[in-house]
Amino acid sequence: SGTNALSISFKDDGPSAALAGTPTTASATLDETGGLGSATISAANVTGLFSTAYGTDGAGSTVYGLSATDGAQTGLFLAGADTSVAANEIRLVAISASQYEGWTDGDTTNGTKAFTVAIATGTGEITITQHAALEHGTDGTGTAHDDSLSLSGAAALSATVTVTDQDGDTATLTASGTNALSISFKDDGPSAA
């Protein structure tokens, strides 16, 4: 007893989240040919960006989200917009931790919504919906009808994961580099028959 007593400690374990060594490709392309629409990045492709484990404490939950810079300039404009007017540029707007939208001048009251990017927090599936045609810089015939724009640079979006073990410890990670999301918008062109 006293100073000769045994000291026994039990140290905690925690979950882990790391970038996958060989990541899946998490990309989507929306094509204005045939009208505006939606595209998805499958849950398997999003979860494949990460390597996660609950650890010895056992399974708790895994929650997916999106990360981007709220208010970021995208370099994108609506079709026919004057690209020399700053207020016409589409900006990213954070709606929640699982949804971003592109609005002209970032104005959700008076602007025009161009696109929505949303992730299912439980599965990781991402849905991208295009609401308005975009101004593509290459004019002309043939391949000019198929040029592409993307959300990149300051306007890039990334998937996030938060792993919580059974006793409440967490690990959070944002995919980056080769594990980042790739979202593109392809042009449409007129036809004459």
Image (cartoon, rainbow, N blue to C red):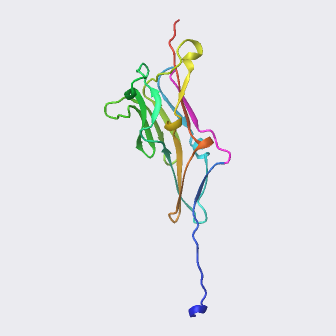
Residue farthest to the right, as pictured = 22
Q: Which of 96 and 156 is in front in this view?
A: 156
- Reply above or below: 142 against 97: above
Q: Quadrant of residue 86?
A: top left
Q: Classify residue 77 by image quadrant.
A: top left
The x, y position of residue 27, in whole percent, is: 58, 35
Q: Which residue is drawn at 49% across and 44% down?
A: 66
Is residue 124 among the parts visible in the rendering?
A: no
Is residue 31 found inside the magenta-colored segment of the image?
Answer: yes
Work out whether 159 lies above or below 84.
below
| Span shown in magenta | 21-32
Q: Is residue 56 magenta?
A: no
- Taking 79 as reference, is 26 left or right? right
Rendered location of residue 158, percent (x, y): 53, 42
Image coords of residue 143 (percent x, y): 59, 16
- The image shows residue 80, relative to residue 19, as above or below, that is above
Is residue 166 in view from this perspective?
yes
At 51% from the left and 40% from the top, the residue drawn is: 157
Q: Quadrant of the N terminus?
A: bottom right
* 18 relative to 68, above or below: below
Can you give x and y, in whole percent of width and height, for residue 155 in the image? 49, 36
